[in-house]
Image (tube, rainbow, N blue to C red):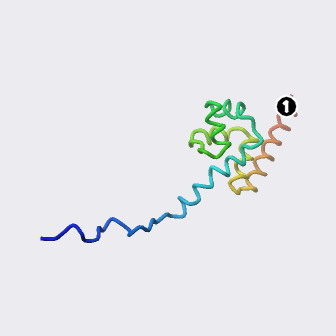
Amino acid sequence: METSSGKNARKNSGVRQVNSVAIRTLSINEAIAEALKGWPAKTLARIVKTNIRTVENWKQAKTGPQVKHVAAMMTDDELCAALLRAFGQEKLARLKKLESALEGVAELEGK
């Protein structure tokens, strides 16, 4: 009869394996907090349709926004550019600002 003192195949003898995605996920909250730094919580809450306390938690990097909130943030041109910059996409951020400026000019010419 086999005893239970043998090594359990499910344990990694105290070593925890963490993949690179999990490590990078920890800094996403900080990147988002940095991008939202200059934005008033009330304005952000209105854009993403959530409460102010939730936005404050994002700004303090305690939690991160859900995908639906990030999608809502991407609808605002300035906020979208700030988030793209925070995620290391400077070129896309510049393109978004340029697109927004061109749309503004087109609206002025149409009047």
Residue with the mark numbered 1: 110
Seen in the picture, residue 108 relative to 89 is either above or below; the reply is: above
Counting from the top left corner in percent of width and height, residue 74 is at: 67, 42
Query: Under tag 1, what secondary structure?
Result: helix
Q: Which residue is drawn at 32% across and 65% down?
A: 10
Residue 106 percent coordinates (x, y): 83, 37
Relative height, residue 33 to residue 45 (above, below): below
Report whether 72 appears left or right of 108.
Answer: left
Amino acid on which disc 1 is placed: Gly
Q: Quadrant of the C terminus?
A: top right
Q: Quadrant of the N terminus?
A: bottom left
Residue in front for this viewpoint, 87 or 1: 1
Q: Which residue is drawn at 75% across and 56% down?
A: 90
Could you classify mark 1 by the number of other residues whose Cα lies within 10 Å: few (under 14), some (14-19), or many (20 or more)? few
Task: Reply above or below: 103 against 23.
Answer: above
Identify the residue at horizontal 66%, vertical 44% (top origin): 60
How many labels, in total? 1
The image shows residue 88 at horizontal and vertical percentages of 70, 57
* Horizontal arrangement in the rendering, residue 56 relative to residue 77 (left or right): left
The residue closer to the viewer here, 73 or 52, is 52
Quarter holding residue 69: top right
Query: Which residue occupies the extreme left position in the image?
Result: 1
List x then y, in percent, for residue 92.
73, 53
Judge by depth and name the residue closer to the eye, 71 or 104: 71
